[in-house]
Image (cartoon, rainbow, N blue to C red):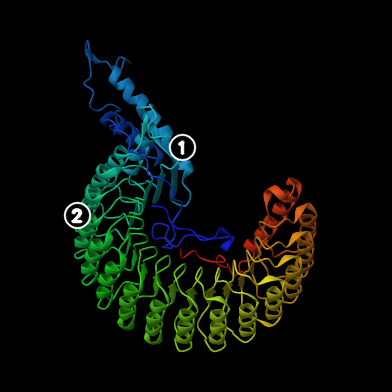
Amino acid sequence: MSEPSFNTLRSSNNPALFNGGAPPLADPGQGEHVPAAQPTQPVLASRDTASAVSSQFAAMQGESQGATIAESTCPVMIGKRTASEAGLESKAAKRARYDGEEVQTEVRRLRELVVDGRLELKCTVSRETLQALTAWLQDPQCEVQDLFISGEHSDSTASDTAVFFGPDLAAALSEALKVNRTLATLSLKSSEIGNAGAAALARALKVNGTLVALYLKSNNIDDAGAAALAEALKVNRSLRTLALQQNYIKGDGATALSEALEVNRTLVTLNLRENAIGSAGAAALSKALKVNSTLDILNLFSNCIGDAGAIALSEALEVNCTLGTLNLISNEIGADGAAALAGALKVNRTLGMVLLGYNAIDDAGAAVLSEALRVNRTLVTLALARNRIGVAGAAALAEALKVNDTLAELDLHYNLIEDAGATAFSETLKVNRTLATLDVGINSIGLAGTVALSEALKVNSTLGTLAVVGNEIGPAGAAALSEMLKVNRTLGRLNVGANSIGSIGAAFLSEALKVNRTLVDLGLQGTSVGVAGAVALSEALEINRALLTLDLKLNDIGNAGAAALLEAAKMNVVLTALHLDKHKVNDDHRRQVASILERNRQLRRRNSSATVTPELFSNRH
């Protein structure tokens, strides 16, 4: 199941909404599922090895090292002396001592990898590493609070028997979790632990009281594994985040998790993104949400719930008092599902974010959602990207926002609102005082719509982010935006990428940048600015002291344009990110620009009063 993606020109920085629940709603790379390897038994530390490790830990704490190394080895008598007294050791004792030394060495290596309590291990884990890690995790003084192990890009079919992967990795960590009291986060992304590994971790969750977040993205877990984890959730009292995205969980697995949610009182985030729970699974979750009082974030991105699933969830939303974020992107929801959700939004008092991108919502669906916006007083973010909303739907939403005083972010990227829809929103922007982000990229907006939006922003005092990526604004549209930027005092991020504004449009924007003091992020990727446009922008950079990020990727500015930007950057102490195409600018220019930008970043870090700005556009898709 691959996530539908927007035009990559949308912005230079596009973090995903869910990365396993953090923000929450941010999610790293996709990737195909690969068959699970045949399980290999974990090689754990023997009692002899554990004794040696304990002695080493005691030494690290300045305690006595008087304990014997091989407590379980029977001494061999030589006359009236034991073998150890005679300076001899059995083979088992020698091996235990050797293994203990190896474990201690590996623990020291792992300790050096820990940064602020976080330990990251990529790909497969060797026998020595796993042995040391599990022993270390059982030590009360273990410094690891967040453990991330990723199996992405690893070869789980390798013949090396000293490599641990899949269920064995989970089983070994499970034993450590039963006694560990420091680990708060465990992530086993793409590690092929399967149902057996999920069951092993579930056994640990029943007794562990400190783990707060468990991320099991892409691990070949199906209904059986979900059921095992659900049983653990019925008794666990510490876990707040469970991420199971990109697995094979269907209706039965969702039902098991739902039954757990009916009694669990600690879980805050459940991520089931890109599974296949269907309408039956959505109905089961709806039943749980009617009684659950802790879940705040539910991610059902791409689960084929359809209108029936949306209708079932809507029934729960009418009575639920805790859910704050609902992600229903890419779920085949049409007008009927939208109508049900709109009805719920009229009475719901907790939902702050509803994501409905990549569905089949048309003008009729947009109209019923608009009616809900007229009375709803809690929704802050509404994402309707890549649906079937046209001019009529846009007009309905725009009218609702004239009276709504809570919505701060509206995403209509990749619809068909055209100039008329953009004009409708421009009238709204003249009176609305809450909308902070508006994305109308790829909507067939031309010069008329761009001019209307620009005129509105001359008087609007709240919009901070505007995306008009992939439209048809041309050089004249850039001129209109430029005139707006000369007087606007609130817009901080403007993305004009994938519009053919050319060098003339770049020159217009350059003139605005010479006087604008609020824009911090400007996206001009793929806008055909050329060498002349780069030179014009460089003149603005010599003067401007507000812009932090300028994206010029996919522009043929050449070495001449890069040289002009380099000279301007030498005088600019504010710009911290300048995105250029590597293959169109020589290495020397790129190195010099990188050095100057690093200088500026260090200056910014040293300025403790500097405000850290968020990314240009957060990815809701």
Q: CA distance from mark 2 to mark 1?
A: 37 Å
- At 21% across and 71% down in the image, what residue appears? 291
Q: Which numbered disc flags the more N-terminal residue, 2 or 1?
A: 1
Disc 2 target residue: 231
Q: Decide if residue 349 is in sight here.
A: no
Give above or below for 364 relative to 502: below
Disc 1 target residue: 109
Does 217 sit left or right of 417 as displayed? left
Residue 565 placement (x, y as % from top left): 76, 59
Q: Residue furthest top?
A: 79
Label 1 crowd (10 A; few <14 / some 14-19 / many >=20): few
Does 376 sit left or right of 80 as displayed? right
Give above or below for 397 relative to 76: below
Dot 1 falls on a residue whose secondary structure is helix
- Hey, which quadrant is residue 486 in on the image? bottom right
Does 357 sit left or right of 48 as displayed? right
Instruction: Tell me how many marks there are.
Output: 2
446 or 77: nearer the viewer: 446
- Hey, which quadrant is residue 543 in on the image? bottom right
Give the amino acid type for the residue marked by disc 2 in the picture: Glu
424 or 327: nearer the viewer: 424
